[in-house]
Image (cartoon, grey):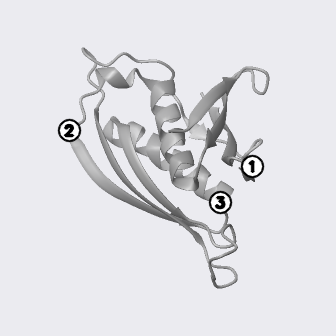
Amino acid sequence: MGRYAVRDDVAVADCALEIEACDLGDLFETAARAVSELMVDPATVAPAVRREIALTAPALDLLLFDWIAELLFLKDSEQLIVTETSAAVEAPGTDPAAASPAGAPCRLIARVAGGPIDREQTTLRADAKAPTLYRLAVEPTADGWRASVVIDI
């Protein structure tokens, strides 16, 4: 399981996250966990809804941006907080052993579970509004992958 940290030295009015994971699926799963924990105490959300989310983007960092935007859209449109995630990411060009067509998009297929915000049960934290492009990055490391993202609060 990946890990994340809130960076207080990057953005004053927003929330800057540094995420590290062993592979891309784990990175996107950890990002979802970080976003959920930013907004609520996940232990106070009863997982009652399951669904699959599929996204494509021309670049890996933009796929992460779209992923976080989708999670926040679910919170805003359905009052749904995702608390469990299983993600598979295809990113052409990141695996030297795999052949992929030039210009092929990055893909995410995630199975998520979560529940609605219950004003009597759910412990609310920050009201995250949207990911930003400021310092948005996804890059390989010696041990896996690292991402940086700033979320507008």
State the residue in front, 49 or 146. Answer: 146
**Sequence order check: which comes first, mark 1 or mark 2?**
2
What secondary structure is marked by label 2?
Answer: loop
Whether residue 69 is visible to the viewer of this picture, yes or no, is no
Q: Position of residue 134 (x, y in %)?
A: 76, 42
| Crowding at mark 3 (Cα within 10 Å: few <14, some 14-19, many 20+) | many
What secondary structure is marked by label 1?
Answer: loop
User: Within the image, what quadrant is residue 40 found in?
Assistant: top left
Work out whether 53 lies above or below 11. Answer: below
Instruction: Tell me the residue that label 2 is attached to.
Output: 48
Residue contact between numbered discs 1 and 2, judged by CB atoms under 8 Å: no
Instruction: Tell me the residue that label 1 is attached to.
Output: 142
| Crowding at mark 2 (Cα within 10 Å: few <14, some 14-19, many 20+) | few
Work out whether 52 lies above or below 75. Answer: below
Q: At 58% from the left edge and 52% from the top edge, which residue is drawn?
A: 23
**Sequence order check: which comes first, mark 2 or mark 3?**
2
Residue at mark 1 to residue at mark 2: CA–CA distance? 38 Å
Instruction: Tell me the residue that label 3 is attached to.
Output: 60
Q: Position of residue 112 (x, y in %)?
A: 34, 48
Task: Name the amino acid type tagged 2.
Answer: Ala
Residue at mark 3 to residue at mark 1: CA–CA distance? 18 Å
